[in-house]
Every structure is written in C-alpha cells, then in structure tokens.
Amino acid sequence: MTQRIVADAGPLIALARTGYLSLLRDLFGVVEIPPAVQAELRLDSNMPGATVLRVAVRTDRWIRRRTLRKPRGSLGLALGAGETEAILLADERKGVLLIDERRGRRAAMAKGIALIGTARILLEAKQRGLIKEVVPALRALTESGYRITAELREHIRRIAGENSQPGQ
C-alpha cells in the first residue's frame, strides 16, 4: 500500500496499546495526523501506548502532524475535534482516512473520502506477511478495551481464513 494515510486517534491508540502500531509504518511509511488528533494521543501521559506513540511522532517521525490549510468546519454530526480534523485533513490531502468510529466514518463517506479501519490494517498486514494471524491481534485489541463487535471479529476471521479459537 502506498496511499497517503490520515489517521484518527482511536486506531493509533489501539494499535499502540497492543504492540501493532509498527504495522502502519510497515504498510504506509508515513501516517499523517492533524493537531487535534495529536492532542488526543496524550503523548506526554503514562497512558498505555503513549510511549510508543511518542517515539513514532517525536523521535522516529513517521507519524507526522499536518496543519489544516482550510479553516475548521462543521461536518453536521456530533463529532469530536480529532475526528473532524482527521476527516478535513484527509479531504485536503486526498488521502485515505484510518478511522473506526461509526459517526466519523459516515461523515467521511458523505464527503467521498476513502476509508480504512483497524481490522483492514490487520488483514493487509497478514496478506503482506507482516503478521501470521489476525485472530490474536483482534483478541489483543478487545482485551485492551477497543470495542469490536463479535460479528466484525468473526467476519474478519473468515476473510483471513483462520479457524475460530475459544473465546472468540
């Protein structure tokens, strides 16, 4: 994948908490984020995943902050600042938006922005040989508090061609 990727905070935090953040670098090289998403990452906190994110943003710099050229606008839905800015930046940069939040996905689709979600990142990583299985990554996401419906987990497992494991 060589597309320009703009990310919302949720997928970045989830991947960082579970040890899978580097998949984004391996798949895309650079991930862009707007200022509000960077603020939501809480890089200076002791939150799970913050250290990994801090290194990716400040030291390795493969997650790069991009300022919006257009003034911040409303998208007509009750979205947070991070989702709003990520959608606007993806639109400005003609990038693919990495977002999982349902309302944010609807707003981005209404603007014609291409989307990718965390589960799709895992499938792409498996397809490229970066991970052997998707099911353990889905389990890690769920155990870290990331909300993924049982239906989505099962759907992704089937696409990945993996056997169901107990507790899935």
Image (cartoon, rainbow, N blue to C red):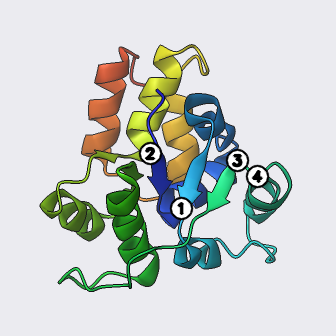
Instruction: Give the secondary structure at mark 2.
Output: helix
Three-letter residue code for mark 1: Gly
Disc on the earlier residue, 1 or 2? 2
Q: What residue is shown at x 39% (from left), y 72% (from top)? A: 83
- Mark sitting on residue 62: 3
Whether tag 4 and tag 1 are in contact, CB under 8 A, the answer is no
Toward the front, the furthest residue is 69
Could you classify mark 4 by the number of other residues whose Cα lies within 10 Å: few (under 14), some (14-19), or many (20 or more)?
some
Residue at image position (35%, 69%) is 88
Mark 4 vs mark 2: which is more N-terminal?
A: 4
Identify residue type, mark 4. Arg
Q: Which residue is mark 2?
A: 118
Q: Nearer the viewer, mark 2 or mark 3?
A: 3
Of the image marks 1 and 3, the number of the one nearer the N terminus: 3
Mark closer to the chain start, 2 or 3: 3
Q: Nearer the viewer, mark 1 or mark 3?
A: 3
Measured as percent of width and height from the top left, residue 20 is found at: 64, 40
Residue marked by disc 1: 145
> Do the residues under discs 1 and 3 have CB atoms within 8 angstroms?
no
Instruction: Tell me whether circle 4 and circle 2 mark residues in contact (CB < 8 Å).
Output: no
163 with respect to 149 (left or right): right
What number is the disc on residue 61?
4
Circle 2: residue type: Thr
- Asked whether the beta carbons under mark 3 and mark 4 sit within 8 Å of each other, the answer is yes
Q: Nearer the viewer, residue 100 or 57?
A: 57
